[in-house]
Image: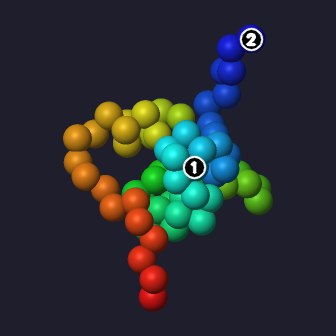
Amino acid sequence: MEDKRLTLSVEETARLLGIGRNLCYARIQTGEITSLKIGRRLLVPKAALEKLLAEPKIINLTLESK
């Protein structure tokens, strides 16, 4: 059965990108990964993730220490 959901959880997004959950949350906070909040859930639209991956720009996917 095909998954017809329009959004992914942060954990699913991190797994698809091959990054850690904390880094995914950090990139959502900076706006590099588009998200939306529905109730208490933070979700990443699949269309926004596909657009992010299709764009040729370089993004910094490292977690910088403060």
Residue at disc 1, secondary structure: helix
Residue lying farthest to the bottom in this orientation: 66
Please tell me which of labels 1 and 2 falls first in the chain. 2
Q: Say which amino acid is labelled 2.
A: Met
Display coloring: rainbow
Q: Residue at x 50, y 44 (%)?
A: 17
Place of residue 42 in the rendered image (x, y in percent of width and height, measured from the top left): 66, 55
Q: Residue at x 66, y 21 (%)?
A: 4
Check disc 1: other Cα within 10 Å, few if <14, some if 14-19, many if 20+.
some
Q: Quadrant of residue 2?
A: top right
Place of residue 60 in the rendered image (x, y in percent of width and height, measured from the top left): 33, 61
Work out whether residue 31 or residue 23 is closer to the camera in this orientation and state it: 23
* Residue 35, visible in the rendered structure: no
- Taking the image as shown, residue 44 lies to the left or right of residue 5, namely left
Residue at disc 2, secondary structure: loop
Q: Say which amino acid is labelled 1.
A: Ala
Q: Which mark is residue 14?
A: 1
Q: Quarter holding the N terminus?
A: top right
Q: Quarter holding the C terminus?
A: bottom left
* Above or below for 1 versus 60: above
* Above or below for 3 versus 8: above
Q: Quadrant of residue 48?
A: top left
Q: Which mark is residue 51?
A: none
Q: Residue at x 46, y 53 (%)?
A: 33
Q: Which mark is residue 1?
A: 2
Distance between mark 1 and mark 2 Cα atoms: 23 Å
Place of residue 57 in the rendered image (x, y in percent of width and height, measured from the top left): 23, 48
Q: In this figure, what is the number of numbered marks?
A: 2
